[in-house]
Image (cartoon, grey):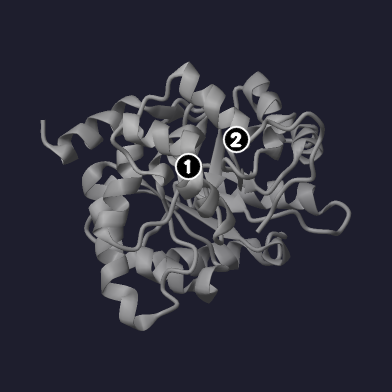
Amino acid sequence: MERSDRIKEALQSHTVALPDGTSLPRIGQGTWKMGEYPEKKKEEIKALQFGLDLGMSVIDTAEMYGDGQSEQIVGEAVKNRRDEAFLISKVYPHNANLSNIHKACEKSLQRLKTDYLDMYLLHWRGLSDGSLQETVEGLEKLRKEGKILRWGVSNFDTSDMKELMGIENGSNCSINQVLYHLGSRGIDFDLLPWHREQQLPMMAYSPLGQGGSLISQLMNNLDIKEIAEKHQAKPLQIALAWTIRTKEILAIPKGTSQNHVMENAEAATIELSEDDLQKLDKVFPKPDRKMPLDII
C-alpha cells in the first residue's frame, strides 16, 4: 500500500464523533499565522489542498488570524472543493454580541468565499456579565439562518463549560478548542475527564507546542527517540499520535508545506502501545492537581 493510501485509510478509521453524529478525522489543519506573508501564499494554499487530498477535511481558522488574511487563504484553498472541507472559524469576544456577531460572521463567510460555516467558535470568553448568554443567543440565530451548521467554544475551562451548560441552548455546544500537547497537559486533570463524561469532543490547537522547549525535549530524550525508532517515525509524529490517542480528541497542527502536511497526517497511522504511553507519561507527567488553563 502506498504511503498516501495508508494515511487516508488511517484518517478514515481514526475519527471523532460530534454530538450530532458527524464523524471527523482526528487530525485536521490549523492556519494560525497563514496569510501574513504574501511570498508564502501559494505554498500555503497548496499545503491546505494537499491536506484535503489526504482526507484532512477539518480546516480551522479565525477572523483574528492575520486580521482575516488566514480566512482568505483558506477560501482560495477550498475553491471548487467546498464539499470536501469542514470549515471552522472563530469570532472575537467583542464581536460575539447580538449587535456584531451577524456582521462578523458575514465578513468571515465573504473572506472564505462560502455561504456557510460547518462550525463557528467563540474564540475566548468575554469579560462582561451576561455576555455568554448573549453569545449563545447570537450563535443560535446564525444556526437557524443556515449561516453556520454548528457552534462551539475555545479556551473554556471546566467552570466555563459548566456555566455554559446551564445557559439556555448552551448544551448545543459541539466542541471546545483548547491548547493541548505533551508539554501542556493541564486539561488531563479535570477538563478532559469532564468532557468524556459529557461525551463532548475537544479540539487540540498547537498540538506540537509553540517555541522550542517541547521540540528540544522530544528531540533529545532517549526514551522518545526509542519510541520513534520503533515506529519508524519522527519524535514530533509521536507527540501528535499521543495527542490523538483517544477518540474524543481532534488535533489541528499547521503544515505550511506538502511534506510537513504529510508528516502530520502520517501520525494517524501510529498506534502507541501501553508501554509507549507509560514512557511518555514518565517524561511528561500527568498533572496531579488543578492547573490554570494554558492559552496562547
Q: CA distance from mark 2 to mark 1?
A: 21 Å
Say above or below: 247 vs 44.
Answer: above
Report which residue position mark 2 lands on.
Answer: 283
Q: Which residue sits at x=80%, y=32%?
A: 166
Q: Residue 70 appears in which quarter of the rendering?
A: bottom left
For residue 19, the mark is none
Identified by mark 2, the residue type is Val
Few, some or many C-alpha atoms within 10 Å of disc 1 (few <14, some 14-19, many ≥20)? many
Q: Is residue 208 visible?
A: yes
Q: Residue at x 63, y 34 (%)?
A: 172
Q: Residue furthest bottom?
A: 38
Q: Position of residue 247 (x, y in %)?
A: 48, 25
Quadrant in which the N terminus is drawn: top left
At 32% from the left and 31% from the top, the residue drawn is: 231
Inspect this view and state whether residue 247 appears: no
Which mark is first along the chain, 1 or 2? 1
Q: Residue 148: x and y, percent?
A: 50, 49
- Indicate the secondary structure of the residue bearing disc 1: strand
Residue 7 vs residue 192: left or right?
A: left
Determine whether 114 is above or below 288 in the image: below
Residue at far right of view? 129
Residue 132 versus residue 11 in the image, above or below:
below
Q: Which residue is mark 1?
A: 251
* Residue situated in front as seen by the camera: 19 or 133: 19
Q: Secondary structure at mark 2?
A: helix
Residue shown at the point (53%, 62%) measured from the top left: 62
Indicate the quadrant where residue 271 lies.
Answer: top left
Does residue 8 appear left or right of residue 231 in this picture?
left
Residue in the foreground of this view, choosing between 116 and 209: 209
